[in-house]
Amino acid sequence: MDTGKQKGHRSSETDADARMPPRSVDGLRELVKRIGRDEAELSLGGKARTVLAKLLERPEETAVRTITDLAASLDVNASTLTRLSTRLGYAGFADFQGVFRDSLAERHRSFYSQQAERLVASSKTHARDATPEVDMVVKLARESIGNVEGFIAQLSPSDLRDAARLIANAKRVRVHGLRQFSALASFFCYGLGMIRADVALLDVQGLGVAEGLAQLQPGDVVLVTSVAPYTRSVADAAIAAKEAGLEVIAITDTLASPLVPPARHAFLVPHESSFFSNSMGAYLVFCEGLLNLVAAHLGTRSLQALERRERLIRTLGIEAP
C-alpha cells in the first residue's frame, strides 16, 4: 500500500474542494469577507470586489435580470460580469446567477416559517424588557415606516402620473390579488369604486380568471398585486392580461417579481418586517396615494361620484346617526 500516494491524493481532493465556488449567496458573502482579509485562495481587484458587493446587496435582482441589464445598472460591460464569474470559479455568468436563483427559491419556500422563527427568537431576547408587548408593536410600526420610506425613495413621477391616468380613463378596471393580498385588492377596489364606475375584482363571481379577463377589451386596466413568495396564478393572470391587449399595472416588491415583465407600470414596495407574514402597512399607504392621484385626475367626476354615493347612503339609512 502506497501511503504517500494516498495522502497526496487526499490532499489533492481537499485542495479541489477548497477551490470549488460557493453554491449559496451566504457562501459568496463569506468568500468576499475572506478575500478582503487575504484568507482566500483567489484575489479580486478593487473594481471586481465592488461589483460583486453590489450584486450581493440586491440578490433578488441578480437572480432574474439579464446580464445586459445588470451590467448597465452597475455601469460596467457585460464582459466584466462574465470575467468575474469565471474568476470566482464558475463555468460562466449563468452558473454564477444560478446560485442567486437557487437561494431565492429556497428562501421563498420557507418564507413564513423563517419569519416566525425570527419572531420567536426576538420574543425570547426581549422577554425581560419593561414593556415587551409595546416594544413589539413599536418595532413593527417603525419597520413599516422604513418600508414607506423605501418606496418613496424610488417613486417615478411619470409612472405615477401615467398609471393614475390609465386607471381614471379606462372603460373598465379589474383588480386581482390572492391569499393575503386579496385584502389589498379588495381595499383598492372599494376605494376606486367610490370615485368611478365599472370597477371590480377580476374574479368577483368566483367563475375563474379566464372568465374575468374575457369580459374585458383592449385598453381596459388590470391591476395585479403579489409579493414574495409570489402566487403563481396571479403572475399567470398578469401575463394573460398583457397578451390580451389589456393594460397591466403591478404593485409588487422587487424587480425580481414575475409581475414586473408584463406590467406597463410596476410599483415596488418593500415589506421587510419582523411580522410573521408579509407586512401590509406600506402597501396600504401606497394604495391610498395612488387612489388620491386617480381622484385628482378625475376632478369633478370623482366629486360627483362621491356625492351620488352619499345620497344613496342617506336614502338607504346605511350609516348610524
Image (tube, rainbow, N blue to C red):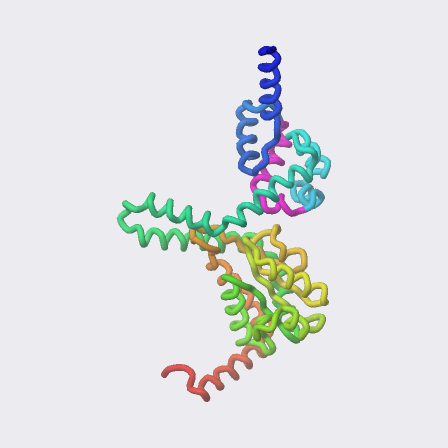
Indicate whether 190 appears above or below 80. below
Please give the name of the residue rendered at 66% of the width and 47% of the height, measured from the top-left corner.
65
Q: Position of residue 226 (x, y in %)?
A: 56, 59
Q: Position of residue 95 (x, y in %)?
A: 67, 38
Q: Is 61 on the left-hand or right-hand side of 242?
A: left
Q: Main secondary structure of the magenta part?
A: helix
Indicate whether 164 appears above or below 318. above
Please give the name of the residue rendered at 54% of the width and 49% of the height, measured from the top-left corner.
108
Task: Note whether residue 288 is visible.
Answer: no
Q: Is residue 47 magenta?
A: yes
Task: Note whether residue 290 is visible.
Answer: yes
Q: Position of residue 198 (x, y in %)?
A: 60, 77
Residue numbers of the magenta segment? 44-65
| Residue situated furthest front in the rendering | 1
The N terminus: image quadrant: top right
Q: Position of residue 15 (x, y in %)?
A: 60, 21
Q: Pick whichever, 233 or 65, lies toward us.
A: 233
Q: How many marks?
A: 0
Please give the name of the residue rendered at 53% of the width and 76% of the height, measured from the top-left corner.
194
Indicate whether 194 appears above or below 104. below
Q: Pick whichever, 60 or 103, lies toward us.
A: 103
Q: Is residue 176 magenta?
A: no
* Residue 206 position by quadrant: bottom right
The C terminus: image quadrant: bottom left
Please give the name of the residue rendered at 46% of the width and 59% of the height, measured from the top-left corner.
281
| Residue situated furthest bottom in the rendering | 315
Q: Pick whichever, 204 or 296, lies toward us.
A: 204
